[in-house]
């Protein structure tokens, strides 16, 4: 219940957040081989980071009010998007929603989890970088300086390998996703062909830049990108551990959502 209350509250102030996004077509950078193990200086990603809020990767439409916004959809993917009833965007509703996270507490997946207004941190070791989230709680291992498995089993958060660039950037290459998650809060779909290249770069003490390239020929006609700036958290990591349950979501719907979205009957 608390999860949905916080998401609703944070969405209302999303327009005030200093978040910059970029959506454009470009060639994915995954073709670059990772450096030999131990040759690149590790980036400083220490501290706790606020994922912030938001609904759409489109920088000109933060609330997801325009469905045909230039994102290079395959026809079926656009039709799928239009059929969804998300909690945010032009078709927003919390009643009879099709959001798998709201209905079933399915994991957000990557990179949608970065629209959930909770904190995350990096635990950096020589062989693995762990990204751990208050929401879930969830953790993602990034295996450093090694190749992907030949045929990874599809999972909620995929298989991630990584390496450092320029002493200030962690590059994360992710494949092996199932097709059950959305890419953002408005319901952008993807297939099991989804391939993400994510770059985490510390801009200064209080800001972390996140760049992501989406490459999914099953759902999109070309690659496209997004960018978000995470702010250093002012509160303790782990203070609020968010656990999603179907029963809590139903309780919230009955107590809050239905009363909000259903017009009251005028008194006679």
Image (cartoon, grey):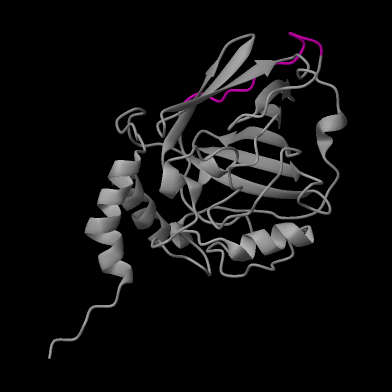
Res 13 seen here: no
Task: Please state if 189 lies on the left or on the right of 119 as rendered.
Answer: right
Classified by dominant secondary structure, the portion drawn in magenta counts as: loop
Q: What residue do we see at 34% from left, 27% from top? A: 238
Residue 63, horizontal then vertical, whole percent: 52, 64
Camera-nearest residue between 214 and 98: 98
Res 141 seen here: yes
Camera-nearest residue between 217 and 27: 217
Camera-nearest residue between 41 and 3: 3
Q: What residue do we see at 47% from left, 55% from top? A: 17
Q: Residue furthest bottom?
A: 268
Q: What residue do we see at 67% from left, 49% from top? A: 226
Residue 214, horizontal then vertical, whole percent: 73, 44
Q: Is residue 44 magenta?
A: yes
Residue 49, horizontal then vertical, whole percent: 46, 35
Q: What residue do we see at 56% from left, 37% from top? A: 109
The stretch of residues the image draws in magenta is 36-47
Q: Is residue 100 above or below residue 239?
A: below
Q: Quadrant of residue 66?
A: bottom right
Q: Is residue 166 magenta?
A: no
């Amino acid at each position: 219940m608390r999860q949905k209350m916080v998401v609703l509250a944070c969405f209302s102030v999303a327009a005030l957040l200093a978040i910059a996004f970029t959506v454009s077509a470009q060639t994915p950078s995954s073709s670059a081989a990772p450096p030999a193990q131990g040759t690149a200086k590790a980036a400083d990603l220490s501290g706790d980071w606020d994922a912030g809020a938001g609904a759409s990767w489109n920088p000109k439409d933060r609330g997801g009010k325009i469905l045909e916004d230039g994102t290079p959809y395959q026809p079926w993917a656009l039709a799928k998007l239009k059929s969804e009833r998300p909690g945010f965007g032009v078709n927003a509703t919390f009643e009879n929603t099709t959001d798998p996270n709201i209905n079933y507490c399915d994991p957000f997946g990557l990179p949608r989890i970065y629209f959930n207004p909770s904190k995350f941190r990096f635990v950096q070791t020589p062989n693995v970088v762990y990204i751990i989230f208050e929401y879930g709680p969830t953790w993602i291992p990034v295996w450093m300086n090694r190749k992907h498995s030949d045929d990874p089993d599809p999972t909620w958060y995929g298989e991630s390998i990584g390496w450092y660039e320029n002493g200030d950037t962690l590059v994360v290459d992710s494949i092996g996703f199932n097709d059950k998650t959305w890419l953002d809060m408005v319901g952008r779909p993807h297939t099991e062909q989804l391939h993400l290249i994510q770059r985490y770069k510390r801009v200064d003490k209080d800001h972390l830049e996140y760049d992501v390239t989406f490459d999914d020929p099953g759902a999109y006609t070309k690659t496209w990108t997004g960018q978000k700036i995470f702010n250093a958290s002012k509160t303790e990591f782990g203070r609020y551990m968010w656990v999603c349950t179907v029963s809590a979501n139903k309780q919230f719907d009955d107590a809050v959502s239905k009363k909000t979205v259903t017009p009251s009957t005028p008194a006679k």
